[in-house]
Image (cartoon, helix red, strand yellow):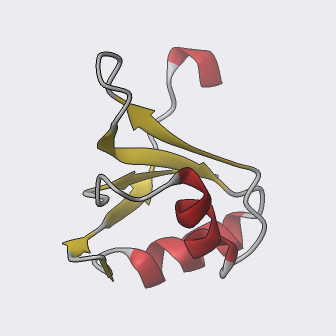
Amino acid sequence: MKLLVRNLPRTLSENALKDIFEGYGVVQSCSLVLDKATGESKGFGFVDMPKVGNAKAAMQALNGKDIDGSKIRVKKAEPTKDDK
């Protein structure tokens, strides 16, 4: 299940994001969305967890959690044309 994670601290690395979610199960992939001009994080990203139960547990536990002063938002990512 692919999750959208918003309101991330802009200083958070992909590895740190992956570590947070790995507490709930295997993370298949993890990516931050970066500003093309600056290369800095835009404050959101995606985490893909192969087991739906683990993804739901992570979503429930982490939505609203304070990470470095930012309350993150976690929800199921909407499928894109590429995912269909």
State whether residue 62 is above or below residue 32.
below
State whether residue 37 is above or below residue 5.
above
Residue 5 percent location from the top left of the image: 40, 55
State whether residue 1 is above or below residue 23.
above
The answer to whether one can see residue 2 in this image is no
State whether residue 59 is above or below residue 10.
below
Q: How many marks?
A: 0
Residue 17 percent location from the top left of the image: 53, 62
Residue 36 percent location from the top left of the image: 35, 17
Q: Nearer the viewer, residue 64 or 34?
A: 34
Indicate the quadrant where residue 39 lies. top left
Which quarter of the figure is the C terminus placed in? top right
Residue at figure coordinates x 51%, y 32% from the top left: 79
Residue at figure coordinates x 55%, y 52% from the top left: 14
Indicate the quadrant where residue 82 lies. top right
**Which residue, as the protein is rendered here, is positioned at the far front?**
38
Residue at figure coordinates x 27%, y 77% from the top left: 64
Q: Is residue 19 left or right of residue 80?
A: right
The answer to whether one can see residue 68 in this image is yes
Q: Nearer the viewer, residue 9 or 76?
A: 9
Residue 21 percent location from the top left of the image: 60, 70
Residue at figure coordinates x 78%, y 66% from the top left: 26
Indicate the quadrant where residue 62 lies. bottom left
Q: Nearer the viewer, residue 72 or 39?
A: 39
